Image (cartoon, grey):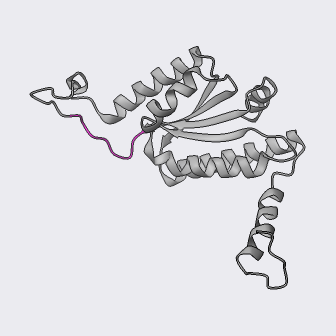
Amino acid sequence: MTALRNILYHKGKKIEVLSSFNPNVFYVAEWFKQLFGESEGKQGKGIFPASLIMSTDLHSMGQWMQDAERTVFETFVAIEEPHQDVIIPYDGQDLDGFNYVAGKSFDFVNKKAYEATSAAHFEGGVPNMTITLGKADAMHLGQLYYFFEKACEFRGNILGVNPFDQPGVELTKRRCLPCLGRDENAKPRC
């Protein structure tokens, strides 16, 4: 992953979108943004991390992913076995026009949407890769966290930045805390 991110970065891909069709990955995606943004974004360097949880974001951000400036690449997180699954019921009146998915599971529909989305984004000029987990359980998610942490450490070293400090965050804290009255001797700059 680190090598691919580095190659894409040097080809002008400055935004990485972590996408998943599994809602269990929502907080992983939020953490991903914090990890890579704080660890890599220094000295005018680094890939801007973003995330999408599909299919919620498929329509709202799908247009941008498909047809905007080509400065983005995408990393999908796929889950082989869902935590739970629901079969889509048949509607006798077909009020929503979705009876063609009746009898199929939500997981099946999400996996097909992932396949179509990754193919469409690739055809639209968005390079993408997929990390597949067996399950979204503590063990597999823990392995994913560790994988991202190691990738982040390697990438920081390649960029020549310290992935373990946060000078921008610290500057904001130093500017904000006196404004909140934490340090009585400091002169607020707010």
Residue 29: say if magenta.
no
Q: Position of residue 62 (x, y in %)?
A: 50, 28
Q: Is residue 165 visible?
A: no
76 to the left or right of 148 = left
Q: Position of residue 136 (x, y in %)?
A: 47, 47
User: In percent of the image, x 62 and y 41: which residue is there?
Assistant: 50
Point out the stretch of residues depicted in magenta. 81-88
Number of disc labels: 0
**Residue 67 position by quadrant:** top right
Q: Residue furthest top?
A: 123
Is the residue 72 above or below the residue 52 in the image? above
Q: Is residue 31 visible?
A: yes
Q: Residue furthest bottom?
A: 184
Is the residue 152 above or below the residue 111 in the image? below
Kindly report the secondary structure that dominates the magenta region of the rendered protein.
loop
Quadrant in which the N terminus appears? top right
Q: Residue furthest left?
A: 92
Q: Position of residue 21 (x, y in %)?
A: 45, 36
Q: Residue furthest front?
A: 190
Q: Position of residue 41 (x, y in %)?
A: 78, 46
Is the residue 138 above or below the residue 80 in the image? below
User: In percent of the image, x 42 and y 35: which residue is there?
Assistant: 55
Is the residue 64 above or below the residue 172 in the image? above
**Residue 131 position by quadrant:** top right
